[in-house]
Image (cartoon, helix red, strand yellow):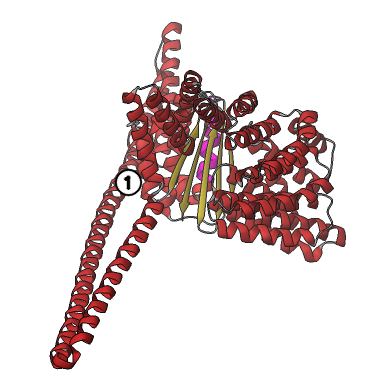
Amino acid sequence: MMFSATGFSQNKIIDSLNAMVNTGSGDSVKAIALTDLGGNYFGYDSIKSIQALEKATAILKRNNWAYNWGYFYQIKAMIEAYRGKFEYSLLLKDTALLFYKKAMPIQDKAAQKNTLFQIAILTADKGSTYASMHDNEMAIKFYLDGLSLYEKTDDPARMEKMGTCYNNLATLYYTIGQFEKGLEYDVLAIPFHLAAGNDETIALAYIFAADDFSSLKKFDSAKAYFDRATPFVKKLNMPSLNIEYYGKTGSSYSNQKNWQKAVENYTIAYRSAKQIGNIFYQASYLRGLADASYYGGNQEEAEAYGLKGLEIIEAHNLIDEKMRLYKILSYIYKKKKDYSNAYKYLQLYTNIKQKSNDEELKKKIYELDTKYQSEIRAKEITQLQKDKLIQSLTIKQKSSLNYFLIASLAASLLIGFLGYRNFRNRHLLVKKEFELQQKQISELAKDRQLIAVDSMLKGQEDERSRLAKDLHDGLGGLLSGVKFSLSNMKDNLIITPDNMAVFERSLDMLDTSIKELRRVAHNMMPEILTQFGLDEALKEYCNTINTTKLLTVRYQSFGMDTRLDNSAEIVIYRIIQELLNNTMKHAAASEVFVQLIREGNRLSIVVEDNGKGFDPSLAENNKGAGLTSIRSRVDYLKGQLDIHSEPGKGTLINIEFNV
């Protein structure tokens, strides 16, 4: 996990930004404030985040401010990174960098300094994104590039940013087991945090250095750095800081086998994690408590902590913690002589271990194979040395025979080697041919499936178009003719007042039927879609829903000036139509946000509502026609569908296509 600091209260920041938006500031300041609001609202009020960014976009579209566009893309990149869309986040960061570099030549010196500082932040942030993608080489490169850029700036915040960069570099080396290198960077970070003067980050810097010393079994140095952090931790008494301080102190005591102290510190860390609802740390420190209690001889507490942690870990599928907890539970039950459970958890641990260590296993097999081949060569050399000794003893009497034998032995070894190499190459060739055949079969099956889906979707759209035309021109014309005839009859008939009221209601019902028929025909194949394109068709469809007052739909698009392929537009229109229908039927939502962003050949679709939400894992097994239809259409365009939802917290659907 990368180093971060909370800074001021988020509520204070939001209040300040709202005041900036509402005090009549100029458009440029307002656009920056709205962009900041979008970033600060994200994570706990997605609708407000989207609304703020939408307002910022509206202002930016009216102007041509390169810096403001750069800042907008920078915040969007941050949001996408939090959503786990790392590649898309990198694309947005690169876009932000382009706008910042475009802004530099037309700015005064003060503005240029600020822009350079933002470029440094973006560069270091790219390091964090690559670290999240487990690309350590690229992460280190961009952290170092970020440090170089920070050194060229004089912004007051650069000291804390540089300290954070060093801490993040340390984290990368720590995760790959290079503790000495990690310690080096964590110690380098401390002077920068001291210069920045932020008590929280100073405390964290001391804690991280202490943890490095503990990992290297240098416990006296670890204690010295923990002691430096203690006054700051006590003064601030922040749950997020307590988690780090007491959790890593507990880990240090565990390394020293001081199990009682480990339990005491892990307990405080766990309570702090529970206080702010941090699931990962709750699970981690319950596992730590189970470990320390087991080795401290308290088997009952160890089991209780282990099972409590297991509930959290399995509910949120925390793989690494799950593996460690299965292992300690197998030890606990073995100690209790409950061999059934001991075997059960050992088997679960082994299964995960095998999956997570495939590369390590391959490496060990390679090492063993190399060792085996070395032993064979050593035996061959020994045998040759023996042969040489025999030859030297009898060389005077049997020189001709010995030369023949040596030549025969060499020929046999050469033939054996060539035979082995030929067999090995043939084996590899057969294996590659088999893999190629399997790949071709898979691709043919996929092509067949796509052809079938293409035919099905084309057939559906053709049938929709035909039915829409028949309904509009055939049945629609017939109903209009009936209405016209009845309207003419009304003036030529003598009808009682009561019957006249019934007659008028019948005409009204005919009007309603004609309107409904036209609406159905329009939904089946809207003319605006074929004439003016996807963007206009979706705008009209969303406005139509808004007129019903059943749901408020906010529609936003960016980069949709150029039309897509006709078949792609129809498929995407049907996807969004089905998503909105599902929202109206099942979500019990009052608002829904629809966004289309096209950047080059990439089209991103977001549909987010504030409804009752659901468990996405259940949707994977859902065989309902609506979701199945959406998935088949997304697959047809070779897109990616991601569903983010929780009961009571609304639903966010993200779809991405190459168009």
Residue 375 lies, with reference to residue 67, above or below; the image says below
Quadrant where the N terminus sits is top right
Q: Position of residue 457 (x, y in %)?
A: 32, 46
- The number of callouts visible is 1
Q: Quadrant of residue 555?
A: top right
Predominant SS of the magenta segment = helix
Q: Position of residue 5 (x, y in %)?
A: 72, 40
Asked whether 50 falls inside the magenta stretch, the response is no
Asked whether 543 falls inside the magenta stretch, the response is yes
Label 1 packing within 10 angstroms: few (<14), some (14-19), many (20+) = some
| Range of residues picked out in magenta | 536-552
Residue 642 lies, with reference to residue 111, above or below; the image says above
485 left or right of 13 in image: left
Foreground residue among 415 and 577: 415
Q: What residue is disc 1 on? A: 457
Q: Position of residue 426 (x, y in %)?
A: 20, 70
Foreground residue among 483 and 180: 180
Q: Residue at x 81, y 49 (%)?
A: 157
143 left or right of 538 in image: right
Q: Is residue 223 visible?
A: yes
Query: Residue flagged by tag 1: what amino acid is it?
Result: Leu
Q: Is residue 629 visible?
A: no
53 left or right of 628 in image: right
Foreground residue among 181 and 500: 181
